[in-house]
Each structure stands twice: as C-alpha cells, then as structure tokens.
Image (spheres, rainbow, N blue to C red):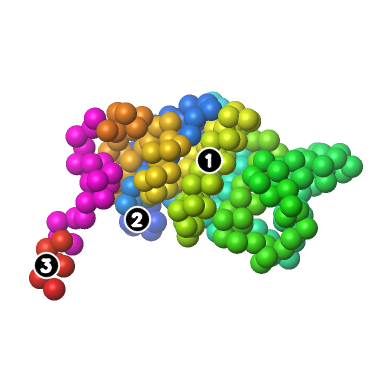
Amino acid sequence: MITVDKLVSHYGTHKVLDGVSFEVKKGEIFMIIGGSGCGKSTLLKQMCGLLKPTSGHIMYRGRDLAAMDEEEMSAMQRTIGIAFQSSGLFNSMTVGENVAMPMREFGGVDPQLIDELVRYKLSLVGLAHAQHLMPSELSGGMRKRAGLARAIALDPDLVYFDEPSAGLDPIMAAGLDHMILKLKSLLQTTFVIVTHELDSIRLAADRILMLDLGEVVFCGTLEEAAASQVDRLRQFFDRRADDFIVQRNISL
C-alpha cells in the first residue's frame, strides 16, 4: 500500500530523517517505534502529506506524494484517516457533529443517512451513547476513541494514528489496542501507528519499524525483533537506560 524510498527530511539545517526506506502492506498494523526525537512523528506527517521531504519518495497506491499538486494532495488525504495524539476534536461541536463533519464536507454522503452512519461509527468504538456529548464531557480515553471514529468516518483503507495510548492509564490503553484490532478485523483497515508503548506493540503489531537518529535500524515482525541482535532494539524492548544516564544517576 505504501512504499517509502530513501526519504530525507530537514528542519532548517538539522537532518531529521536520513535515507529512510520501507513498505507497508495492505491490511496490517504497522508500528513505528524509537526513542524521543528520533523522527517518528515527522515521518508520520510526511506519510500523511502534511510535510514535504527534502528528498526521496513516498508512494501511496503507486503515486508519489511529492509529485502531487495541491488538488491531488487534497483528494489523496480524503482517502485516509488521521487520528491525532490529542484527538483533534472540535470543542464547539458535539461528538456526533465531529464524526459527521468529514461526511458533510468531503464524503458526498446522503444527508438523510449521516446520523445513522455516525451512530454506526461511534458504536464501532464503543461510544454509541456519546453522540450528543461535548468533547469536554469525555474522558481522555473516550476522546481518543471519538477521534478514531472520526478518522474512519469515510471508510478509509488506511488510518494513521499518532501515539494512541499517550496519557491513558493501562486499562484504557489496552481497551484502545483491542479497538484497533477489532477495526482491522471488521473493516480490513491498514493502520500505521507511532507509539512507544511496549504492551501495545506486543499485542497489536504485525510489523514494526524502529528509527534511531533518523535512520531505520530494524523493520520486521515481532518474532524477528525478538531474535534480532540490534542493540538499540534490544535496549528498547528490555527497557534498558543509556549507560551515560545510569552513570550520571550513580554519580548524583
């Protein structure tokens, strides 16, 4: 579904991504992992078309995002779902109005069917009762699920999710992980997820990509990750601190 080839990205003179290459297969849960500041969120934004790379290619269904004009990019973005870390809900709209918004703006959906479709999308994420609530009336986990319902409003084949478990307690995080697995099974949706949550990775990932200092150090299945001798990958899964941090704490 997606091919990223030799992607390079800068913020000013600072190189964030350096020759990143990988593929995402249709129908899989593909997780992007790595330490803070390694380039995960930048990569996700470029895959969504929200940022342009310095060089390299991102092919979505055989088309290069970098070669798209504004109209083509807008059309492409309507075929994907994006669930933001903060949920990205409009506080002035009810939950139902938030989910309905893409249908009204971009979906060409019969207005008489929108309320029924909104209820269906919310039921998929366990929020059928919350259609008339305001975002301020929801817990953090409910807002995440509402954001996911809006991301799948137009039945996209591909959904990008940035740090879905951030700020959630373990029970809510596990519930969201199971929700993603359910949506993958029911709708055959492809998910590309940026995360650092080990429990989520072990439960839901089909394949993982690890970035370190803007470069790919591993890409493969969990079984392949378990057998890998890549030190940064082992350090991540073993929750092992960098030596300089350990030494600093000892000296203090």
Task: Give 6 or 170, whichever is nearer the viewer.
Answer: 170
167 vs 155, left or right, is: left
Given the current orientation, which residue lies at the most extreme bottom position?
252
The secondary structure making up most of the magenta span is helix
Q: Position of residue 96 (x, y in %)?
A: 76, 53
Q: Which residue is mark 1?
A: 178
Element under disc 3: helix
Which residues make up the magenta segment?
227-245
Q: Position of residue 54 (x, y in %)?
A: 41, 46
Element under disc 2: loop
> Do labels 1 and 2 touch, CB within 8 Å?
no
In the rendered image, is residue 126 in sight?
A: yes
Does residue 23 lie above or below 71 as drawn?
Answer: above
Task: Give 134 or 34, whichever is nearer the viewer.
Answer: 134
Q: Which residue is mark 3?
A: 250
- Residue 231 belongs to the span the image colors magenta: yes
Q: Which residue is mark 2?
A: 37
143 vs 15, left or right, is: right
- Residue 149 belongs to the span the image colors magenta: no
Residue at position x 40%, y 41% in the image: 201
Residue at position x 87%, y 43% in the image: 111
The quarter holding residue 137 reads bottom right
